[in-house]
Image: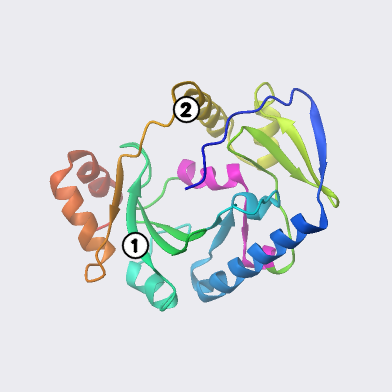
Amino acid sequence: MMPREKIVRVWDEREVVYSPKRWRCLREKREKAQKIMERLEQFDPQLYGSVARGDVRKNSDVDIFIPYRVPSYLIELALEGLVRRRKIVMATPWHLIKGVLEIDEETAVTFPLIDPTDRELEFYRWGGAIDLWGVKTNERIPGVNKKLILIVPTERGHIEREVIGREIEVAKTLGVSIDIVRERVHVLTRRDRIGRTGIYINEEVPDWMSFEEALKIIADRDPNVRRKVRKRGGV
C-alpha cells in the first residue's frame, strides 16, 4: 500500500523535466498496461491515474478501469491465468460498488458491479484516463493527482498547477463538471485534515464464488448496498 500523499500548494505553476530513468519507468508501466488492456479490448478498458498522465514514479500503480457493467465472468475469462486476488470495494455508502482483480502488487483491473452514474465516471477523467489506442500511440492526458495538483503533460515532462482557486479552469481542462472538481477538493482537503477515514466495503471474493453472488450476500445483510443494487442493478 502506497503512503497517503499530502496536499501540496504550488500557488502558481512549475515545470518538471523528466530524467531518462523516469521516461523508462513510464514506458515499462505502459507496456504492462497495454498487454492487459489488449486482453480486455472488447470492454473498452481505460488506463487512469499517473500512468495515463505520465508523472509516474517507481511505486506508481497501474490502474485499469472498465467503464460499464459487464458480467464478471467475461472479464475473468479474458484475464485467465493473471489474477491473484479478487475483491469487492466501496469507498462509502454513496460511492460506486466495484469489483477489483489484482494482477500483482502494483496492477489492478476495476469494474462496476452496478450501473455507474456520469458523476462516477467523471472521477476517472478527473485523474486522467486514456483508452487502449491512447496507450499504443503514447498519448498522455491532463489529470489531477492526490495532492490536488493539476498535471499537464509536455514534451519534456509536465507542468504542475494549483487546483484550489482554479476550479473552473481545471474543469475546462479536464472536460469534467465543476461539481466533480469541487467534490474532489472537498474530499481530499478533508482527508488531509483528519486523515484517512477508512473504506465502507473491502471484501475478498473466494475463488469458487462469482462477484455477483458475493454482492448478493453483501446486499442481503447491508441495507445501503441493497438499496443501491435495487436502484441501479447488479445482481
Which residue bears the numbered disc 1?
86
Q: Residue at x 23, y 48 (%)?
A: 230
Judged by its main secondary structure, the magenta piece is helix
Residue 96, above or below 106: above
At mark 2, the secondary structure is: helix
Which residue bears the numbered disc 2?
191
Give the magenta-colored segment's residue range. 118-135
Give the quadrant of residue 102: bottom left
The three-letter code of the residue at mark 2 reads Arg
Residue 232 point in image, percent of width and height: 30, 49
At mark 1, the secondary structure is: strand
Residue 130, above or below 121: below
Q: Is residue 33 visible?
A: yes
- Quadrant of the snapshot with the C terminus: bottom left
Q: Is residue 233 visible?
A: no
| Residue at the outermost left position | 221
Q: Residue at x 53, y 64 (%)?
A: 45
